Image (spheres, coloured by chain):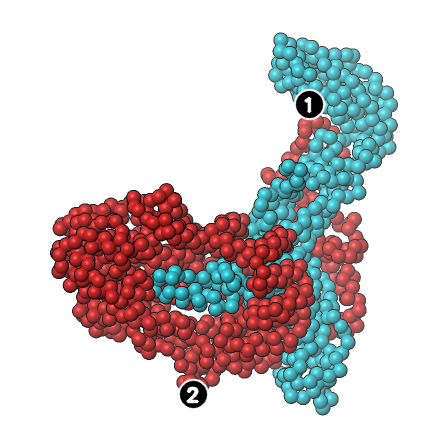
């Protein structure tokens, strides 16, 4: 096969048309009243126009379908459909026709033809038709390569190819943000922006959690027993519109208890997005696994189990802390120290032995405090020292309490 | 309507854009390369390192490449395209390498663990070593100082090829026909000589078609007039001559508002002169205001206009000076747009001889009256009709070059303007319409009211501007790409309609004056203004639809249903189609179900057709072309002449891979009743399929041109033939 075949008349013609969804014909309604100069003429013209809606001619959006006018845009996750027609333009019968449609992307080459079998013969003015479908999975340049080989009546083997190039664009911009709640919950906020040029109906935006989490979608509220979306009546995204979705992830029991397991970079899950555009043209994308940096608790994590929100001035109150050994294999021998700060004072003995703490295990610690100053006060000054490694861990500003004068009755 | 475009004109022309066929590579012999928009030609693709290599690849490796996830090309397979799960896994949003970025020799399939984060993710930001200083975390939310300011991290890779590729340039088609100075020459005689002009004008206003604008006025009106309505004590020179000095209206006393049921109408000027010679009789003037005129002409002028009209009415025998600014001085702005695109194409493709057979009516080939005008309009020779309107207006002294010159208006001249402008809009010549509409301002100038001409229209009240012209005036703006202005104007019209309805319901006349109206007349008036309100709501909804504000558009259509309950099933189906267009199939289905409930009450063909049509559309929305085709065919079984079902069934056939069947269906339809089915949408589909069928589409298109030439008038939009 020559690299540059000389120009020659082929007996067959290959035509390709992208099949986006058809569009509805819109007409321009112009009406007049009986009393006006044209009388009923304008209205009669509109009634005679087959593209208007029978009985409601003023309605602009008609029912007549028109074929796509141009290639349009194609977006990642949509399905590329195309009509491939090979027509015998000549007046002789052509034999052994093989039509192949391949899609060349930047990374691979796919065969899209429904059948790879050759057609035995094609009479003049007859067609070989094929409609190909392909869900596009890559951004960037795609080339549809159509190759036609056939044999003429005099036995000459003929071959030609055509290339059709198109760009696959990105339809959505997805941004995420994590919030770590003090309880081990994680909140995921996802902003999804429509960066296409047409309105987009979001059929499904769901978070598929990884094995460690359960997910609760926070995008609907219960109104009068019915689940109502928080997005109101606007079910679609205009071009460049962004919508914010919120999810709450809870670690499953078996993972939550072993607090040490969820640390460092963890996989949260992925967003699964299904949208539809003109006349139900469908697209679907998934994000890659969303990852979160679990808050670094270091070797020893101190978390609060219980604390009153309001306390009386100069009256002792209790808090409960949970101390977890987050290291993987090191047993710790911990000593608790307390440095008094300006307002909140620790009641008890400093330098208390907490004993040995095994990896991934935790202990609960009840402490008594007393505040000498009113207002919102921060609890600080807790020190844990691991006597094996002689390493001290400092815990400041672990919580706030509101301190009120004892004259005011604290409501339980 | 699917593609985004700011300019409405673009949207309207969308269905006439260039072919969808993807162009060839230049080294192929077919000569149809290059007619396509979006796809560029490619030579042998660089990526595939030229033909021969691709060749061998496909010959040997065809089976391999069939499997989606093989990534067997080895060169830079996307890291996210994993082989582990089939379907959507492949289309990872992140991690798809940007086009040029295949530097990495990536293992490819099934390797998510090694490259978990797409290159564009914020991973580097967060890769702080996990074992740094212990951070006590006891505030409710942890701090993430390293993130960007809004705290969001992008989850997608920006493809360098992406930016700028999506926006289709908005272009404004140059549609304006330039005014040509030759027109004044063309109409030299009537335009320059006043007497001639008014004679000419009279000739048509006195014709039997006088009744077109005022059905209640019989041909005997002039006789009635001379005896009954002897109005002005003094003859107004301005009333007789179209171009009189501004603000020189003479007013007469005692314009009674009482209405009696005799209905003379605008009179020819010659008669008016005679009339004014008579003696004053205030009661007679009252007779001239008919119920029907009052009902349909009623309008509420703005405050400034109301003041001027009041002073015209009260200042008898003295002049009222009206600022030139507040007068309406229209004139033709461009030469006749007479022309025949069909004939031009015939000359080009079929030769002079064939073109000579094309016969369309011209402005001069019909009677120069309203009769001729109607003949041109119904024969779809709208260009000629626009031209004829121009001639008639020229005769009235509002011809080319007369813009900005003082003139007077009659009900007939306003009707002529309305027809001319409406036809320009129908022809899609929006800029032209806008140029000539400009002189009319907001259609509220005092000289557009009957009260301004007490001598000509004694006792008559209300606006000369046809209600439909107000709608047209508002809607024109949306076609020019100013939907906001269109909405403002529509809402002003709506406000007046509502106010008039309130007046009527409170027992007043339309304009809020005390008046005794019989209950039947009041009911008729309420009905008229209710339907006008519905008409405005429909226009509002259409305009909102064009601006793609679907939520408001749907609300507006619901409001329109309240005013036009007889159109409920059609409008509900329309709302359903809006949701289909957005892609909200579920809501569309809900509306279609509502339609089925509503149509249960009315049996008959129309209801059944509507239900079947909606079901077909629903299947279309679910990508099920086979079922959609079944329902469209079902409609044809009960209504074989249904053009929409015929066309839509043919479109479905194409999507099912049956080009020849589809063509057969459309061709049969056009041959069966060319008068009806040579519609541009059908022809557009037909020519598109011809182009897809073979390289010899030209002959077939030319055959269509011949069919069009024998059936269609000069207003035919030839773009759908895709010959040019």
Output the chain of dot 1. Answer: A
Q: Residue at x 33, y 72 (%)?
A: B371
Decide: is A368 above or below B157.
above
Question: Label 2: which residue?
Answer: B353
Decide: is B16 above or below B260.
below
From the top left corner, tell me how far across and down residue A187 is, in percent. 69, 37
Residue toward you, B214 or B197:
B214
The reply to whether residue A169 is visible in this rendering is no
Q: Residue at x 25, y 73 (%)?
A: B187
Report the side of A58 relative to A321 (left or right): left
Considering the numbered disc 1 on the image, is that residue within a helix, a strand or a loop?
A: strand
Question: Label 1: which residue?
Answer: A399
Picture quadrant of residue B341: bottom left
Output the chain of dot 2. Answer: B
Q: The red chain is which one?
A: B
Crowding at dot 2, Cα within 10 Å, few <14 / some 14-19 / many 20+, comes out as: few
Q: For the residues carrying marks 1 and 2, which lies nearer the camera in this image?
A: 2
Report the side of B15 relative to B324 (left or right): right
Crowding at dot 1, Cα within 10 Å, few <14 / some 14-19 / many 20+, comes out as: some
From the top left corner, tell me how far across and down residue B60 is, in percent. 79, 72
Is the same chain shared between marks 1 and 2?
Answer: no
From the top left corner, tell me how far across and down residue B46 is, in percent. 66, 68
Q: Which residue is drawn at 71% across and 11% down?
A: A316
Residue toward you, A353 or B323:
B323
Q: Residue at x 17, y 57 (%)?
A: B230
Picture quadrant of residue B261: bottom left
Report the side of B230 relative to A249 (left or right): left
The reply to whether residue B143 is visible in this rendering is yes
Q: Which mark is residue A205?
A: none
């Amino acid at each position: 096969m020559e690299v540059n075949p000389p120009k020659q008349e082929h007996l067959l013609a290959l035509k390709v048309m992208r099949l986006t969804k058809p569009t509805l014909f819109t007409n321009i309604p112009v009406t007049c009243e009986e009393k006006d100069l044209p009388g009923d003429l304008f209205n009669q013209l509109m009634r005679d126009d087959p593209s208007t809606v029978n009985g409601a001619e003023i309605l602009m959006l008609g029912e007549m379908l028109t074929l796509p006018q141009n290639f349009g845009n194609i977006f990642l996750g949509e399905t590329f459909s195309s009509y491939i027609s090979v027509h015998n333009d000549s007046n002789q019968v052509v034999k052994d026709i093989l039509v192949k449609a391949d899609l060349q992307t930047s990374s691979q080459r796919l065969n899209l033809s429904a059948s790879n079998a050759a057609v035995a013969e094609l009479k003049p003015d007859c067609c070989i038709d094929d409609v190909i479908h392909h869900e596009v999975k890559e951004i960037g340049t795609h080339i549809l390569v159509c190759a036609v080989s056939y044999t003429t009546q005099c036995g000459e083997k003929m071959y030609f190819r055509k290339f059709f190039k198109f760009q696959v664009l990105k339809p959505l911009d997805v941004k995420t943000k994590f919030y770590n709640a003090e309880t081990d919950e994680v909140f995921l906020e996802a902003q999804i922006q429509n960066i296409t040029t047409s309105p987009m109906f979001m059929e499904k935006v769901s978070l598929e959690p990884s094995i460690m989490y359960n997910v609760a979608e926070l995008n609907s509220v219960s109104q009068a027993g019915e689940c109502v979306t928080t997005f109101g009546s606007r079910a679609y995204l205009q071009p460049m519109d962004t919508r914010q979705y919120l999810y709450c992830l809870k670690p499953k029991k078996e993972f939550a208890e072993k607090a040490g397991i969820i640390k460092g970079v963890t996989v949260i899950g992925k967003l699964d997005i299904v949208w539809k555009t003109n006349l139900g043209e469908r697209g679907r994308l998934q994000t890659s696994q969303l990852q979160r940096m679990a808050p670094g608790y270091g070797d020893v994590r101190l978390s609060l189990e219980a604390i009153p929100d309001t306390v009386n001035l100069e009256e002792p109150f209790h808090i409960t802390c949970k101390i977890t050994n987050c290291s993987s294999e090191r047993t710790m021998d911990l000593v608790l120290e307390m440095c008094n700060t300006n307002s909140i004072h620790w009641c008890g003995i400093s330098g208390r032995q907490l004993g040995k703490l095994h990896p991934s295990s935790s202990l609960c610690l009840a402490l008594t405090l007393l505040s000498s100053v009113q207002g919102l006060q921060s609890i600080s000054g807790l020190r844990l020292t691991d006597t094996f490694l002689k390493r001290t861990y400092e815990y400041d500003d672990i919580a706030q309490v509101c301190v009120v004068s004892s004259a005011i009755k604290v409501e339980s | 309507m699917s593609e985004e475009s700011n300019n409405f004109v673009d949207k309207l022309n969308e269905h006439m854009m260039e072919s969808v066929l993807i162009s060839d590579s230049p080294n192929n012999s077919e000569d149809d390369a290059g007619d396509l928009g979006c796809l560029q030609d490619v030579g042998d693709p660089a990526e595939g390192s030229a033909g021969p290599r691709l060749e061998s690849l496909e010959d040997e490796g065809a089976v391999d490449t069939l499997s989606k996830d093989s990534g067997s090309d080895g060169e830079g397979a996307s890291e996210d395209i994993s082989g582990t799960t089939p379907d959507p896994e492949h289309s990872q949003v992140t991690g798809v390498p940007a086009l040029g970025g295949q530097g990495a020799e990536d293992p490819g399939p099934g390797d998510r663990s090694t490259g978990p984060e797409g290159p564009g993710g914020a991973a580097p930001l967060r890769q702080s070593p996990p074992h740094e200083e212990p951070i006590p975390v006891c505030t409710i939310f942890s701090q993430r100082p390293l993130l960007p300011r809004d705290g969001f991290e992008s989850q997608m890779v920006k493809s360098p090829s992406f930016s700028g590729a999506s926006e289709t340039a908005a272009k404004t088609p140059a549609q304006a026909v330039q005014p040509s100075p030759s027109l004044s020459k063309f109409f030299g005689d009537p335009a320059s000589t006043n007497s001639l002009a008014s004679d000419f004008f009279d000739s048509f206003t006195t014709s039997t078609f006088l009744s077109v604008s005022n059905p209640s006025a019989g041909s005997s009106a002039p006789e009635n007039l001379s005896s009954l309505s002897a109005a002005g004590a003094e003859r107004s020179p301005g009333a007789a001559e179209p171009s009189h000095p501004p603000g020189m209206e003479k007013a007469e006393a005692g314009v009674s508002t009482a209405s009696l049921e005799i209905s003379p109408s605008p009179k020819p000027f010659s008669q008016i002169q005679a009339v004014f010679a008579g003696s004053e009789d205030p009661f007679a003037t009252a007779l001239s205001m008919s119920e029907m005129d009052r009902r349909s002409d009623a309008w509420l002028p703005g405050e400034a206009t109301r003041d001027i009209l009041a002073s015209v009415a009260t200042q008898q025998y003295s002049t009222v000076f009206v600022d030139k600014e507040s007068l309406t001085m229209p004139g033709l702005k461009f030469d006749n747009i007479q022309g025949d695109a069909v004939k031009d194409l015939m000359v080009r493709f079929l030769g002079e001889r064939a073109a000579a057979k094309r016969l369309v009516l011209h402005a001069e080939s019909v009677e120069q009256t309203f009769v001729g005008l109607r003949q041109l309009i119904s024969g779809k020779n709208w260009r000629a009709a626009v031209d004829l309107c121009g001639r008639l207006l020229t005769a009235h002294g509002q011809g080319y070059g007369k813009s900005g010159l003082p003139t007077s208006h009659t009900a007939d001249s306003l009707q002529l303007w309305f027809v001319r402008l409406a036809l320009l809009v129908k022809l899609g010549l929006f800029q032209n319409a806008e140029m000539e509409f400009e002189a009319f301002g907001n259609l509220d100038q005092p000289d557009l009211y009957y009260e301004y001409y007490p001598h000509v229209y004694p006792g008559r009240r209300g606006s000369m501007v046809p209600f439909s012209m107000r709608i047209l005036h508002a809607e024109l703006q949306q076609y020019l790409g100013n939907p906001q202005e269109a909405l403002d104007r529509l809402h002003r019209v709506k406000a007046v309609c509502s106010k008039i309805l309130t007046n009527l319901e409170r027992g007043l006349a339309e304009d809020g004056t005390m008046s005794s109206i019989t209950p039947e007349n009041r009911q008729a008036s309420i009905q008229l203004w209710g339907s006008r309100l519905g008409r405005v709501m429909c226009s509002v909804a259409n305009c909102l639809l064009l601006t793609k504000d679907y939520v408001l558009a749907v609300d507006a259509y619901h409001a329109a249903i309240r005013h036009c309950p007889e159109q409920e099933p059609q409008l509900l189906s329309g709302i359903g189609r809006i949701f289909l267009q957005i892609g909200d199939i579920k809501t569309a289905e809900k509306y279609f179900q509502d339609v089925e409930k509503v149509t249960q009450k009315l049996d008959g063909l129309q209801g059944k057709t509507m239900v079947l049509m909606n079901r077909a559309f629903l299947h279309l929305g679910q990508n099920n072309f086979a079922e959609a085709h079944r329902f469209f065919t079902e409609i044809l079984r009960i209504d074989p002449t249904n053009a929409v079902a015929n066309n839509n069934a043919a479109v479905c056939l194409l999507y099912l891979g049956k080009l020849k069947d589809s063509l057969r269906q459309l061709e049969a339809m056009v041959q069966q009743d060319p008068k009806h089915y040579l519609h541009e949408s059908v022809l557009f589909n037909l020519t598109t399929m011809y182009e897809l069928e073979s390289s010899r589409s030209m002959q077939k298109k030319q055959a269509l041109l011949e069919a069009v030439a024998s059936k269609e008038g000069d207003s035919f939009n030839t773009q759908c033939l895709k010959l040019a």
